[in-house]
Amino acid sequence: MGGDEGSRIPGFHTLSPADRLDAVGRRSGLGNAGKAHLLEAGAPLTELADHLAENVIGTMNVPLGVATNLIVDGEEVLVPMATEESSVVAAVCNAAKQCRETGGIFASWTGPRMIAQIQLLGVADPHHARVKLLERRDEIAALCDSCDPMLVKLGGGFRDLEVRLLETRVGPMVVLHLIVDTRDAMGANAVNTMAEKLAPHLEGWVGGSVKLRILSNLADQRLVRARAVWRTETIGGPDVRDGMIAASAFAEADPYRAATHNKGIMNGISAVVLATGNDTRAIEAGAHAYASRSGRYTALSRWEETTDGDLAGTLELPMAVGVVGGATKVHPTAQANLKIMGIDGAERLAKVIAAVGLTQNFAAVKALATTGIQAGHMRLHARNLAITVGAEGEEIDRVAAALIERGEIRQDVAESVLSEIR
Ligand code: NAD
């Protein structure tokens, strides 16, 4: 394949975003309308996007909604959420409203300590090496801190050292963990730089050869916790409360259920992470790895009855987010979103995100334990179908309403309803 066909486009990366779009358009039959859409939708941010990623032809817009009603640690906060999934933002608003009378959500965190890993292979005497490395703690601290004087000036930097010995199918490994306070940054680049700087010294000190030098996304020294109480009378009575507790127990006991339970939590969390220009994959990886820490995958949250007979929800997970570094500082939408939340530090951001995760979970578990989620979802699905078949303006609501009334939420029915209306 070559010419204007196939996936090989020599020099693609050297083109401007507009020329890349032309090249992709020629190969894919995207057409002028598709090209015009990408140009128009992406225009204001294409230049920035071209610096953030590679082979950029435009940007992908995702709906940005604002969750209302949240009180986190006694302070009211409006939370922008970037998500393409319907019901996610509404669910947080709803759940947050129902716990305002008990003060909203309370959160705490362990501080911004990231872990970087260095893998050493072929060390003859791993136990000896471990003790020798731990002896050099101060030297290692100084080497790490010399990588990022700015971070040290801000009160961050090297905090601790761990050396682990792993038995693997390619033999024993010595794995060094650098524990670093990354302040208001997510810290991936900061700790990776330290790990790379330290690596050559390790071989000199204990022998063997250094291979991987990279942070761990299981950021279990950077946990955030959220808790809230919902009054039983507010949420619909003891049956609702007990149904939610049973739903929680189901997710705690069964990985099949836990995966979906946690996905619901991440619906809220990833939306705020994305809205603030943070790394959604890092947060997702950390959350699911943390959910498996006992050796069996389980729920990230717990729902219990309080001594007063109310419903208490708690959530705990790693939260490696920042307000500097990565795309957070350079993306104007991320900056605007932080401003909407009134946030200028990683601590408050982590806490607000955990609060969103907990309220999101409340809404999903409550819906599942009572009416089910399909009624609400199908209403939104009906609107999507109406748009899919070409309804515009007020036609969208009319077609959606007709589909719901007929109890037939299908594309062919939407098409015939639209033509009847017209
Ligand atoms: P960065 O490289 O821009 O570094 C941020 C710097 O900000 C720090 O080195 C520190 O000196 C400084 N800083 C910290 N607190 C500050 C404050 N309060 N005021 C001013 N400066 C401050 O960014 P990063 O956070 O190290 O890296 C994040 C990026 O790395 C993300 O884009 C992420 O996607 C990417 N990444 C992730 C992984 C992974 O998750 N596995 C791996 C590699 C890269």
Image (cartoon, rainbow, N blue to C red):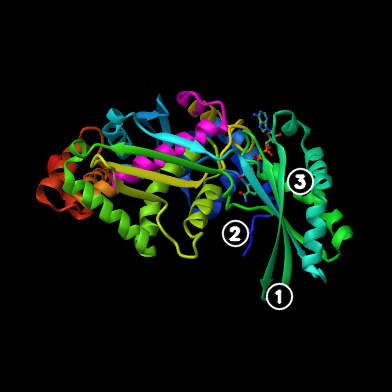
* Ligand 1 within 8 angstroms of badge 3 C-beta: no
Query: Residue 33, can we see it?
Result: no
Badge 2 amino acid: Ser
Of the image marks 3 and 1, the number of the one nearer the N terminus: 1
Q: CA distance from mark 1 to mark 2?
A: 37 Å
205 relative to 40, above or below: below
Residue 354 is covered by the magenta coloring? yes
| Residue position marked by numbered label 3 in the rendering | 194
- Kind of residue at disc 1: Val
Sequence-earlier tag: 3 or 2: 2
User: Is label 1 in a helix, a strand or a loop?
Assistant: loop
Percent coordinates x, y for residue 124 in the rendering:
83, 71
Quadrant in the picture for the C terminus: top left
Marks 2 and 1: in contact by CB < 8 Å?
no
Q: In the structure shown, which secondary structural element does the residue marked by tag 2 occupy? A: loop
Q: Which residue carries the number 1 mark?
A: 170
133 vs 71, left or right, is right
Q: Which mark is residue 7?
A: 2
How many residues crowd mark 2 within 10 Å: few (<14), some (14–19), many (20+)? few
**Does the residue at mark 3 contact the one at mark 1 (Cβ under 8 Å)?**
no
Marked residue nearer the N-terminal end (1 or 2):
2
For discs 3 and 2, the disc positioned in front in the rendered view: 3
Q: Which one is nearer the viewer's eye here, 312 or 250?
A: 312
In the image, the segment drawn in magenta is: 338-364
